[in-house]
Amino acid sequence: MEVIIWVLILFILIYAIIPYVLAAKLGFWVCWKGKKDAEIALTFDDGPDPVYTPVLLDLLKRERIKATFFLVGERAARYPELVLRMSREGHCIGLHNYKHQCNWLISPWKNARTLEQSARIIENITGERPVFYRPPWGMMHLLDFFLHKQFRMVHWSKMFRDWKRKGGSKKVSNGLITRVESGDVILLHDCGVTPGADEDAPQYTIEGLRVAIPALKARGFRFVRMDEMFDKHFSIKTSHRRKEIEP
């Protein structure tokens, strides 16, 4: 029995814990921090959301900055008009699984199938196939790096726990203004319906961004998409398919 327990512990370490630590803490195998001076990337997970995503897009448009959205496939299928708007307004779109589920708890091959399903959903809407993939909660395992070679794996270098309302907008604005450095990939959220999140939390994220964006601009930061920050490593694949959606 003791041998079985130690084998199980070793398996968990090799399969999940060590790959996660190498990616999340040391940046191995993932896009997590750029190298160009004064460039930062705003990234938003878990959307699209019919309440908060349009407000966020309005803010980004008004500030004339581009961001990257990591979309949940089933939500992209439910709100294609928001996905199309993201694309038309010049934002980068990546994948965040078909459902918001931890990679550690589902079959790697099932995850591969649902990732492909999500990629097709987005490609059919926008005409562009996503090439970035950020797993929910950033939880990567060993096989992620072998089964998803068609995607660039993404983590982050700064986050401010904006999926919880505690601390309000000041938590977000103060974190962005005081902690952001050149090359940071910043994790934020435009949807609060996922497990562990507060449903109204994106309201405070957006309010914090209203304060932080002008302050960061004043310090000379440029806001870029993920494909601009890591442009030497890949190119976006484009198709001619696009779902026609009434404006």
Image (tube, rainbow, N blue to C red):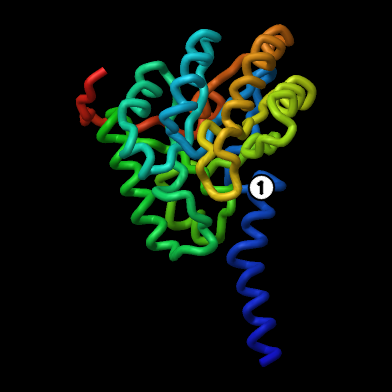
Q: Position of residue 167 (x, y in %)?
A: 74, 32
Q: Position of residue 63 (x, y in %)?
A: 55, 9
Judged left or right of residue 197, residue 90 is left
Q: Residue at x 63, y 31 (%)?
A: 186
Quarter the N terminus occupies: bottom right
The structure residue drawn at horizontal position 70% and vertical position 90%, both measured from the top left corner, is 2
25 shown above or below 14: above
Secondary structure of residue under mark 1: helix
Answer with left or right where residue 3 lies relative to residue 153. right
Task: Report x, y in % for residue 7.
Answer: 64, 81
Residue 189: percent from left, percent from top: 56, 34
User: Does the image show residue 119?
Assistant: yes
| 28 displayed left or right of 88 | right
Amino acid carrying label 1: it is Ala
* Whether residue 147 is situated above or below residue 70 in the rendered picture: below
Q: What residue appears at the point 29 percent right and 35 percent down from the top-left corner?
A: 123
In-image side of 120 versus 187 (left or right): left
Residue at 44% in and 32% down? 49
- Dot 1 crowding, Cα within 10 Å, few <14, some 14–19, many 20+: many
Residue 118, quarter of picture: top left
The residue beneath circle 1 is: 24
User: 150 and 156: which one is in front?
Assistant: 156
Tag count: 1
